[in-house]
Image (cartoon, rainbow, N blue to C red):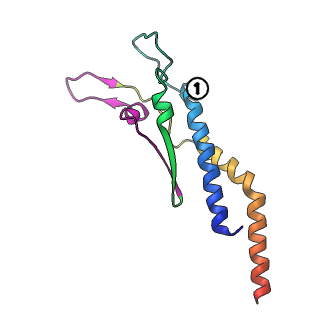
Amino acid sequence: MDINKLAERLMKDIKVELQDEFDKNFERKAFFEQTWTPRTAYTTRGSLLLVTGNLRRSISAKIDGHSIVFSSSVVYASVHNEGLKAGRGEGFTMPKRQFIGTAPAVKDAIKRVVDANAERIDKVVGDMLRKGAKKK
């Protein structure tokens, strides 16, 4: 396995881990440890951000070079993730109920993946160094 394949595999592993963690935020009803603001209006349908499940199912991720880009096809995803405060006189606010983004828990998840792949990394680098030494 060369270094490019290793980096590709590492990015795929990180993507899967973060997809799982962001999905769990819907079960936690929180952005990791930061609990979402409860609804002000009572509704009998569904749970917070899980009335139909469309938002949760709409989350996708793709690897773009050395980045992982998360997106949603649901138009209201960013309103929930970032919150909304309407202009003067409109009186509408949507509390931020973040489910995707950066946080210490994201860094911890990435570290877990990197640590799990450390042995593979050591082997690939060692093999590269040995091959390089033999060429000289």
Measured as percent of width and height from the top left, residue 77 is found at 41, 34
* Residue in front for this viewpoint, 120 or 104: 120
Would residue 61 appear left or right of 83 to someone viewing this image?
right
Residue 62 visible here: yes
Say which residue appears at 58% left-offset and 26% top-offset.
Answer: 27
Q: Quadrant of residue 117?
A: bottom right
Residue 91 covered by magenta stretch:
yes
Say which residue appears at 61% left-offset and 53% top-offset.
Answer: 12
Measured as percent of width and height from the top left, residue 7 is found at 63, 62
Would residue 75 appear left or right of 106 to someone viewing this image?
left
The kind of residue tagged 1 is: Glu
Could you say whether the residue bearing mark 1 is in a helix, strand or loop?
helix
In which quadrant of the rendered image does the N terminus lie?
bottom right
Region rendered in magenta: 67-93
Q: Crowding at label 1, few (<14), some or many (≥20) Cα neighbours within 10 Å? A: few
* Residue in front for this viewpoint, 67 or 101: 67
134 up-or-down from 96: above or below: below
* Residue in front for this viewpoint, 55 or 34: 55
135 up-or-down from 77: above or below: below
Would residue 23 appear left or right of 5 to someone viewing this image?
left
Say which residue appears at 76% left-offset and 87% top-offset.
Answer: 135
User: Can you identify the residue that label 1 sits on?
Assistant: 27
Say which residue appears at 46% left-offset and 9% top-offset.
Answer: 44
Query: Total label count?
Result: 1
Residue 85 covered by magenta stretch:
yes
Residue 32 visible here: no
Q: Quadrant of residue 87?
A: top left
